[in-house]
Each structure stands twice: as structure tokens, then as C-alpha cells.
Image (cartoon, helix red, strand yellow):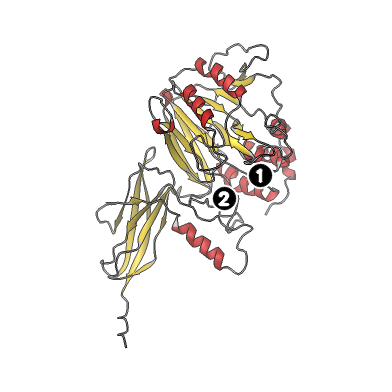
Amino acid sequence: MIRSFLWLAFLPIALALPAVASSACMPVTVETSLPLPRSESGVAAGCIAYRRAPATLQGASAQVLVFGDPQVKSAADVDYYRRDIVEPLIGTPAALGIVLGDLVDDAPALYPQVKTVTGLLGVPWLYAPGNHDVDADAVSDEASLDAFHRAIGPDTFARETALANIVVLDDVIVQPGRQPAYIGGLREDQFAFLERWLPSLSKDKLLVVAMHIPLYRRDSADSFRAQDRTRLYALLAPFPHVLVLSAHTHIQQQYAHTARDGWHGPKPLHEYNVGAACGAFWSGVKDAAGIPAATMADGTPNGYAVLTVKMGGAYALAWHNARDPEDTQIGLHAPKVLRHGAYPAWGVYANVYMGDADSRVEYRIDDGAWKPMRRVLQPDPALLAENARDDEADVLRGYDRSPEAKASPHLWRGALPTDLAEGGHVIEVRAFDRWRGEVHAQTRYRLQAAASPRAPL
């Protein structure tokens, strides 16, 4: 394993240590294909400092890489991030990238390395801060991102492109000396900025809101403040094409904000809570390349997302497991053998990584008729089996064991028949992804005759 990062010193220093904005106004980058508004003078609340940058998202469509939580805590983790996520993407057709916070795991000294490794992809990157990016000795929320500002840049900013407008928001409200130590929400200066900037935008483009802590309600002490959510809803409601990107949870989930949440836009507000690049904090058994499995608690492999933005506010999303040449979209778990003629109490489970409550998921056996699978809110059995292997091991199987399996929001089950012929049978599962269309996965099980049970004495 590579333990030294001296090679980073030979890359341009500008990639690692950008200058912090000198203006007190919020920075908005306007790409060269668009007219440049005049920056506002003074330090009035919400004032905007406009800047130029080369065009990225243009043409009929363009791709954006989206990383959730690289969350490195050591040189070893930076090495995993480089080899598992970044290097396989060199040569990407993406024109822009977004990191949704938790660049580091309370290790600000690693900011330059994370930014330089990410910069190997050769596209502009937008970085949101996360709760593990705050200064450990912060005495206030206002002073909680000093290290982030020095090494990475502003915590709140926007970018206007030909195909989409993107705003990156620090939504971690630090509460030193209190419990919880932070909550989700926005500052008054951020609201002032949004109140000035959003009305200047065209409504025929996609508006992307990128943040760390999810906007949707969560049963967690650090959930996004309800009053801030209501205020943000009101600012976003006039826009017909909005996508919220969040991270933080180390699972993956699609969420539709509706009237039950207090959202009153023209259609449900789509939030994609993106899985983590580090998965479950770079945990689990290492593979032949020395990289941990890093499977998340919902059974989703670690990886990254691709957002494709299109003309007229349209977009598409795709999840890609790290270093997966098959680009697997469905994880299957089924028993290897069942008794022929047994009661059909056992099933195949399909973890549809980009699935949601409305997803159509079906299965069939041996080219038979397709049957619907039932969505179940329970842990992925494949990860439960890995938990059992960790429990039964006499020695540590990795630096940190895989996470305890939690109920997955995108798991489906289908009962396996036992009245077919003895021998092997093929299980095929298909799901209908709203962007990719039909995706498939396949596995096998075997039916075996058992000896007659011994007669009772």
C-alpha cells in the first residue's frame, strides 16, 4: 500500500491551496457563454461578487460527477480514495464535479491532499463543507470553517452555466458546548444571498441545490431545522426544475418533498441523498488490491454518482459502484440450496441501489413469467451475512468491520419456488430505473432432495 504522498508536491500548488474570496459578498461564477452581471459594491446583506470562468455545462447535455463524503482520516484513506474512486475516473467525460461535504474525518491537515487527488480528474470542482470539516476548536458557527476556507475556499457560492444553475450551501450549524454539537440549517447571510440571487435566474434551467446534511426530515438530532426548511421551500417553489443533492447519511435514498412536508412547488421536489465515496468509512474486508469493501449500512457499495444535465431543466442520475466493470445496479442475495418440495418460506432479495417506493421490480425463474417483487423495509441479508462472518471470526478481518446492517429503503423480496425439478435454477431480476430504463441481475439456486426423516421412536 502506498503510505507516502510526496508525489503530491509535484502537482500545481494552486490545485491544493486556493485563495479565499477577498470580498464579503457571496461569490457567483458565471461561465463565459453567459453575460456577466455587475458585482455589487459594499457589504450589504446578500451582496454578490460575480466572477468569470470557462464554460463547462453546455451543449445539449453535460455530465457532473457527484461525490458524497470522501471522509479520509489518514494517508491510508487518501490512498483508498485515490485508487478506488478517482484514478478509475481519469479521462471522464464529465465537465464539472461536486463534493457534498465531509472531505475529511476531523483531519483538516489532509485538505490539500484530498483536493489535489480530486484535481487529478482535470475538471473544476465545487466543494460543500460537512460536519466533519468543521474546526475542532471552534467557539462559534461563524468561526467553525477557518481551516476549510484557507485550504478549500468559500463555504457558500454559486455557479451559473448554460445548462444549469448550481448553488452550494454550508448547511451545518455548529453549536459549541451544546448537544447535538451541530444541526442542519442555513445562516441569515445565506438566506439574504438566496433572496437576491434566485430572482435573477431563468426558470427554464435546472436549479441544483448542493449541501451536506439532507433537507428532508430525519429521525435524528442533527436533522435540518424545520423553520429553515420552510424558508428554503418558499424560495425554491417558483422554480419548476429543482434538484437537491445531499450526503451525510452514508446510505443512499431518493426522497420526494410534497405537501405533507410543507413543499408547495408545481411538482414534488426531488432530493437525491447520495451514497458516500468512502462507503461506511473505508471499513470492511480488503480485496486483492488492498482496498476495503466499504459497503454502506443499507447494502449499497461505495462509489459515486453522475448527474447529466440537459436543456430545458431535464436531468438524469446514475449511481456507479467503485471499480465495478459490470456497473451493477442490483445486488442479489438468495440461498444456494433448498429442499425440494419444502414450504416456500425462503426468498431472493434485490437491493436496487437507485430504487424508491415507486420502483417496479420483478423476478422470474428459468425464463418463466415475470412476477412482481414486494418492497420490504429491512436490512440487506447480504450485509447481515457479512456481519455474521465478522462476529464469528477469531481475529479482525479488516481494520474496521463492516457496518451493522440497517433497514434499506430500496430492498425487494420474491419467494423462491421449491416445486420445480431437482437441480439448478436461474433467478433473474429486473428493475425499471426512471433514467436508465430496464436493468437486470442474475443468480442461481439449487433444489435438492432430502432423505426421509427418521421415523419417531
Up-down relation of residue 44 to residue 134 (above or below)? above
Which quadrant does the C terminus fall into? bottom left
Q: Is residue 95 left or right of residue 108?
A: left
Report the amino acid beneath label 1: Asp
Write down the residue under mark 2. 280
Q: Is residue 359 left or right of residue 23?
A: left
Element under disc 1? loop
Report the amino acid beneath label 2: Ala
> Of the numbered discs in the image, which one, if any, rests on residue 358?
none
Which quadrant does the N terminus fall into? bottom right
Q: Position of residue 139 (x, y in %)?
A: 73, 34
Q: Earlier in the sequence, mark 1 or mark 2?
A: 1
Write down the residue under mark 1. 105
Give yes or no for contact between labels 1 and 2 (Cβ–Cβ under 8 Å).
Answer: no
**Depth order, front residue of 297/66:** 297
Up-down relation of residue 7 to residue 64 (above or below)? below
**Depth order, front residue of 407/333:** 407
**Depth order, front residue of 96/194:** 194
- Mark 1–mark 2 Cα distance, whole angstroms, equals 12 Å
User: For mark 2, does the 10 Å Cα neighbourhood hold few (<14), some (14 to 19), or many (20 or more) residues?
Assistant: many
**Depth order, front residue of 423/228:** 228
Residue drawn at (44%, 23%) of the image: 237
Q: Position of residue 163 (x, y in %)?
A: 48, 24
Residue drawn at (62%, 49%) of the image: 80
Up-down relation of residue 244 to residue 114 (above or below)? above
